[in-house]
Amino acid sequence: MPKILSSIEQYSQLIASIPSTYTTVTWSSLTLWSSGIKSAVLEGEVIFKDNLRLRLYEEIDFASAEILTYSYEVYQGDDKLYWYDPWPHPHDLKLASTHPHHKHVHPDIKHNRIPAPNMTFSAPNLPFLIAEIEQAIAELRSSLA
């Protein structure tokens, strides 16, 4: 079976299946469009229960079956909770284990970065991101119970 990132059709199917696959997803505006013969851009939002949302941007090269760049931001309402990006920070030695992938977290979200071992250029990141948000929803609900 070919890798999902080697085919715009397969990646489109993954994107289209999100609202029906995940019960915590209430809406998705994800749009995947061709930006070249074997490349595409994915952009939009996935809205979850409990006022959580994922904003994302990816550039994908289907010829090499890889994500070229990405940005994933998670919000609760208008509050940005965290984000992932692959911007290199070679002088930050604590990020070396997952270079260039890292996560920005509070406090001082712009400068406070931690390694992101689940981010990759070679496979879809969406399943992990959604699972992480679903875990946050479960934790929110258990804290309110």
Image: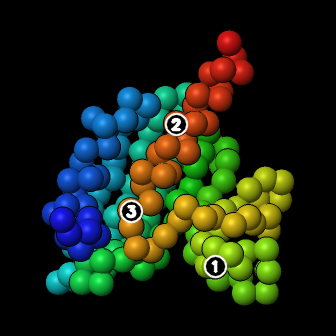
Give the labeled residue for mark 3.
Answer: 124
Is 108 placed above or below 98 here? above
Q: Residue at x 67, y 48 (%)?
A: 81
Q: Point out residue 51 in the picture as x, y percentages from the top left corner.
A: 55, 32
Of residues 4 and 25, the one nearer the viewer is 4
Q: Residue at x 71, y 79 (%)?
A: 96
Number of numbered discs: 3
Question: CA–CA distance between discs 2 and 3?
Answer: 17 Å
- Residue that sits furthest to the top in the current view: 145
Report if residue 27 is visible in the image: yes
Left or right of 100, for residue 13: left
Left or right of 145, for residue 21: left
Is 10 placed above or below 36 here? above
Q: Residue at x 79, y 74 (%)?
A: 94
Give the labeled residue for mark 2.
Answer: 134
Where residue 78 is drawn, which disc sits there?
A: none
Please tell me which of labels 1 and 3 falls first in the chain. Answer: 1
SS under mark 1: loop
Quadrant for the N terminus, please.
bottom left
Of residues 130 and 27, the one nearer the viewer is 130
Question: CA–CA distance between discs 1 and 3?
Answer: 17 Å
Give the labeled residue for mark 1.
Answer: 99
Is 70 placed above or below 141 here? below
- Residue that sits furthest to the bottom in the current view: 90
Residue type at mark 3 is Pro
- Residue that sits furthest to the front in the current view: 1
Residue type at mark 2 is Glu
Of residues 120 and 51, the one nearer the viewer is 120
